[in-house]
Each structure stands twice: as C-alpha cells, then as structure tokens.
Image (cartoon, rainbow, N blue to C red):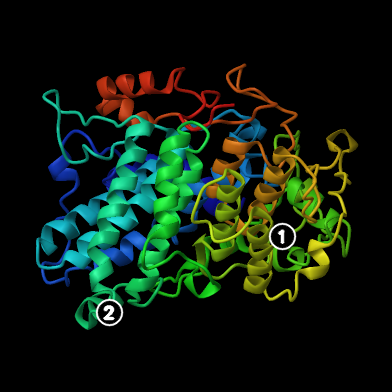
Amino acid sequence: MKKKFTLFLGAIALVAVGLLTFQSCTKDFEEINTDPYRPQNIPVGEEFKQVLQNIYAFSPAWITQLQQNLIGDVYSGYMTPPTPFRGNSNNMTYDLVDGWNEWPWNVAYGSVMSPLRRMEQNAGTNYPEFNAWAKICRVEAMHRLSDIYGPIIYTNYGVLTPNGGVEYDCQEKAYMQFFADLDAAVATLTPLKDNANAKANFANFDLVYNGDITKWIQFANALHLRLAIRISRVAPAVAKAEGEKAMSQSVGIMSDNSGNFLVTSSDGSTHPLNVMDNAWNDIRMGAPMESILTGFNDPRLEKYFEPSVIVPGVHKGIRQGIAIAAKSDYEGFSALDDPDKVQLMTAAEVFFLRAEAALLGWSNTGGTAKSLYEQGVQMSFDQHGTGSAAAYLASTAPAAPYVDPVNAANNAGPASAVSPKWDDAAGTAVKWEQIITQKWIAVYPDGQEAWSEYRRTGFPRLYPVLVNNSAGKIDSQKGIKRINFPGPEYRTNKDEVDRATQCLGGPDNGGTSLWWDID
C-alpha cells in the first residue's frame, strides 16, 4: 500500500480517540452519542445523508478498507489484495487483525445508529415518514453488522444496564426485530407514498431515490425478503411467512433497475474502491471471479475488471490466503473497472431471491424458479449494458481452472460445478447452486452480502486458503465464519460481551458459525 495506509495503522488509536468518539457505544453513552459540534439549526432529516453514506462508508477510503474491503470483499471471493500486510499474516491468511476488524462496529454505531437516534429525537411525532425511513436504514445497516459479528446491540441501544453496559441481542432476536421494524416502516409509509409533503421532505436528504417513497417501500420489501431467505435454513417456517408477506405487500417489491439501491455521494467523493485500486494498488480481482466469469464467457467480466498487466490482455485474479513475498509479485493482476455509486441491492438480486423462494415452494413468488432465475440474469445484463442474455442462458460452458502465473502451487480446478443454462432435470441442490452462483455474480461488488450468502449456502465453491495463520481456530476448508467482537467492547462492556458470546454456541473467534449458518 502507499504510505497513506502505512501511516494510518500507526495513528489509528489517536484518530479513534481524538476525532471519532464512537469507539464504544456503551459506557458514557449519552456523552458519546451527543454531538456538541452539531449546529442546532440543521434541518430535521439532515442526518440521513450521513447515514446513507456510511452503511458502506464513502470516505475516507481507509475506513471503507477496514469496514468492508479487507473482510467481506475478500471473503466473498470477489477481490484479493496483492499487498502482504503485516508480513502476510493478516485477515487474508486468517490471522484476524483486531485493530482492523473493529471498524465495521465503529462506523455502524458512530455514523448510523447515533445519528438516527438523534434524528428521531429531533423529529418526534412531527415527521412519521422520517421515523419510518430511519427504521429501514437501521435494518439495512445493522443486518450487515450482525452478519459480520453475530450478536449486536440493537433493541437495547441507548439503554444502560445497572453496571453501565449495554445488552446485546442474540442474532435470532435481532433478526426478529428487523422484520418487525420493516413491517412498521412499510405500514407508516404506504399511506404516505403519494403525499407531496412527505415526498418533498424525503427528497431533501435522499441520496438514493430522490424522495420516491414508493421505491423506498419496494426496497424495504426486498430487504425483508433478503432477510427471510437468509434464515430459511435455520427457521424455515418463520422465513416462509416473512418472505411471502414481503412478496405480497400491496405496494410491491423491487422489480426493475430503476429501483436499484445505489447511493450517491453528497459531496462528489469518488467510490472508495477506486482509491484502493488506483491510488494505492491495494486490491485486485479474486481468483474465483476469474474462474467463473472467464469460464462462463460472461460479458460482465469486462464491466467488472480490467485485463491484467502480468498476462497482457488476459484477466487474472489473485487467490486468497497464499504466500505473497512482495506486493510487486501480484500488483499486475486485474484491477477493478471503477465503480461509481455504492451498490447495496439490485433488482437482479431480488429475482434470484424470488427464484430461491420458488425452489423452496413458497407462495407469491410471481414465477417459477427457472423463469425468475433467467429474469435475474437478464436484469443483471441490463444493469451493466451487456445486451441480451439469451445465448448466455443457453450455454453449458463450465467454470475454468485457475492458473497462477506467479506460483503454480496456487493453481486449482474450477470454482463452480454448474453452468449458466438452467437444467430442469437436475436436482434441487444443482438448481440452488445455479441460483446462488448467478446471484453472486450479480451482487458484485458488494462483498459483504456475497460473503453472507456464501456462508449460508456454500456457493459458489470458493478456493480454500493455503496459508492459515489462525492457530487452528478457523478451518481452511470451511473458511472464515465471522469476525471477533471488537476489543473496545471487551474493555468497556465486558460482562455483556461475555453474555453475547454464549449466544454463539462457541468461542469468540472466526471459526464459530452465526445463527443462520448451519453448516
């Protein structure tokens, strides 16, 4: 990495203590979550801009690198750094770096939960649309956090225990509250969807849909379906009820690319991936992406990544968890084709969610598993401007073997066992793998969501690490399951962290599965 990264690691404690006063949301809660520098005449709702730009942090890029890139983006198989951080003993080789991995927590509580709480206090009962909007934003941000750590502080946020801590929710309880919050938000917004005043209020602060309440409701329903599918293996009856409800809600569910949840920067900041990729040369294409996209002859490959320098004109990805002696060895692998807006959900993903729901036998899906799968692929093609997907959907081309031009010891077979063509004669397991593999391609570059789905399903079949520095805590074949609770929480909220660890059913480390991850 450039000097910028090297320097911030050394200064991270000073930054966290001196400038970003959200290291812990527990002791001294009121002091921490009351901003003395907030001008008192800021319009009610202004906080939404901060929130929307920190579900996935826009800037500075080093925060995003720690919030998502060196966690979900890597563990999803989408990307891998060429940089051997900390002598190649780091998140990629399963030596989890606590100082890095507390940043998803820091951002979620400091730049999402805190401003939303402040906004709701200022809005009171005068802006019911804002309170509903806050619930949707809160669920979108905090389900991502829960899918990193497991138990989180959610229903008890802002409520101190007698010993001055804050109680965690086990992940099951948090998910049930996510569903309840989305229900409440949709119930409030549905009669307001054509209300001119409410729409104008939204438009002042909306960095996604420019005040279109209908699209917010449809996004909330899509998010509801995502979370229902997420728990479909561990709580099938609840999942079915919640998913069918989301798909049948009167306003509808995200169904075309005009409803894609894409966040625009309010100040013109470039996408942080572009900084990591172009300015720092710290992230490159992942090996599973090379295997699947090149093998499938997928036209989205050119939209996602640049050809490599190391093998000119050919796309080359880096395998995660390998021996890297020097950054220069892998820096010439495929760079990212610069993204613009931050993508948190697309219509293509929703079609794949509905396809899986149909495969599970749920009602209200609006089609068969096959028809919804094929619509999902075409919707993704439309999003990226790659034309008709008809020939692609007729292809039985398999994923390609992976070849590392630097070190043949990293070579591996195909990362997927399926092809794009739907096989009606195949069993449920094959169809499920096809749906998830195509969803994985379409969800790019949101590695956090893709990592969650990989842990839930095991698809696509990512390559295991070859260098495992976890001291036996993380299985190389199963992969990383979660991130440890943040160090500051142990220092300020230890009793509650200890109770939260009991929810996990295992130790607080990267090898313990989350509630919905039953494999």
Q: How many marks?
A: 2
Alpha carbons under labels 2 and 1: distance apart: 44 Å
Q: In x, y percent, where is residue 485? A: 40, 30
Nearest to the observer: residue 438 or residue 341: 438
Looking at this rendering, what residue extends furthest in the bottom direction? Answer: 196
Q: Secondary structure at mark 2?
A: loop
Nearest to the observer: residue 219 or residue 53: 219
Place residue 432 in its image quadrant: top right
Q: Secondary structure at mark 1?
A: loop
Tell me: 407 left or right of 462.
right
In the rendering, which numbered label is found on residue 351?
Answer: none
Please give the name of the residue rendered at 66% of the width and 58% of the height, measured from the top-left corner. 373
Q: Which image quarter holds the C terminus?
A: top right
In the rendering, which numbered label is found on residue 194?
Answer: 2
- Judge the density around disc 1: few (<14), some (14-19), many (≥20) Cα neighbours within 10 Å: many
Label whose residue precedes the other's in the sequence (2 or 1): 2
- Judge the density around disc 2: few (<14), some (14-19), many (≥20) Cα neighbours within 10 Å: few
Q: In x, y percent, where is residue 455? A: 58, 36
Q: In x, y percent, where is residue 497? A: 32, 24
Tell me: 41 left or right of 340.
left
Task: Using the image, determine if residue 434 lies above or below residue 490.
Answer: below
Please give the name of the residue rendered at 13% of the width and 43% of the height, measured from the top-left corner. 30
Q: In x, y percent, where is residue 324? A: 75, 37
Disc 1 marks which residue? 335
Tell me: 429 left or right of 280.
right
Task: Using the image, determine if residue 110 lies above or below residue 481.
Answer: below
On the question of residue 78 being in view, the answer is: no
Q: Amino acid at mark 2?
A: Asp
Nearest to the observer: residue 56 or residue 154: 154
Q: Amino acid at mark 1?
A: Ala
Place residue 340 in its image quadrant: bottom right
Please give the name of the residue rendered at 37% of the width and 61% of the height, measured from the top-left corner. 249
